[in-house]
Image: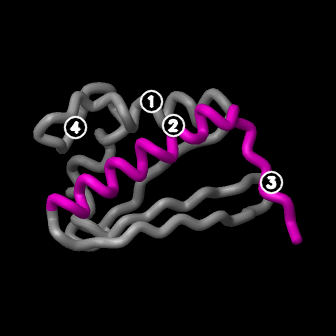
């Protein structure tokens, strides 16, 4: 079977995954619906970790802002979690993107 390699310190990868899980769990709790799906995919010269939740999705006008520092959709959030995730992933030569359909994922 193919090997899936990640060029990130395990502790930092855990922080990224915890942040993504916390965000998904928050919005699943808020909306009262949703599931979390995590998968891995090899695509040519790179690997992809796909993280998806089916809580509420993100409005098209906000999707470009979610990785910006201090942008948040949470009542008590400060907007640093996804910015941190992007910074850590980019430091390893990777990237993080978001695709969403409002009301679905």
Q: Magenta span has 14?
A: yes
Closer to the camera in the image, 23 or 61: 23
Residue 13: give x, y in percent of width and height: 60, 39
Residue that badge 3 annotates: 45
Q: Quadrant of residue 101?
A: bottom left
CB under 8 Å between discs 3 and 2: no
Q: From mark 1 to mark 2, how far is it between C-alphas? A: 9 Å
Work out whether mark 1 precedes mark 2 in sequence or the reverse, and give the earlier one: 2
Work out whether mark 1 precedes mark 3 in sequence or the reverse, and give the earlier one: 3
Q: Magenta span has 51?
A: no
Work out whether mark 3 precedes mark 2 in sequence or the reverse, and give the earlier one: 2
Q: Which residues are magenta?
A: 1-30
**Which is in the foreground here, disc 1 or disc 2?**
2
Q: Secondary structure at mark 2?
A: helix
Q: Main secondary structure of the magenta part?
A: helix
Q: Please tell me which residue is depicted at 41% across the width and 67% down the height of the picture.
A: 36
Q: Please tell me which residue is depicted at 14% across the width and 35% down the height of the picture.
A: 76
Residue that badge 2 annotates: 15
Q: Is residue 24 above or below residue 92?
A: below
Residue 17: give x, y in percent of width and height: 51, 47
CB under 8 Å between discs 2 and 4: no
Quadrant assignment for the C terminus = bottom left
Q: Are there few (<14), some (14-19), or many (20+) residues within 10 Å of tag 3?
A: few
């Amino acid at each position: 079977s193919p090997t899936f390699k990640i060029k990130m310190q395990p502790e930092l990868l855990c922080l990224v995954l915890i942040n993504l899980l916390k965000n998904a769990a928050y919005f699943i709790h808020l909306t009262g619906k949703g599931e979390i799906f995590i998968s891995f995919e090899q695509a040519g010269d790179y690997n992809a970790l796909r993280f998806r939740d089916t809580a509420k999705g993100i409005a098209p006008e906000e999707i470009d802002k979610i990785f910006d520092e201090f942008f948040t959709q949470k009542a008590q959030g400060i907007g640093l979690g996804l910015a941190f995730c992007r910074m850590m992933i980019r430091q390893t030569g990777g990237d993080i993107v978001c695709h969403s359909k409002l009301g679905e994922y």
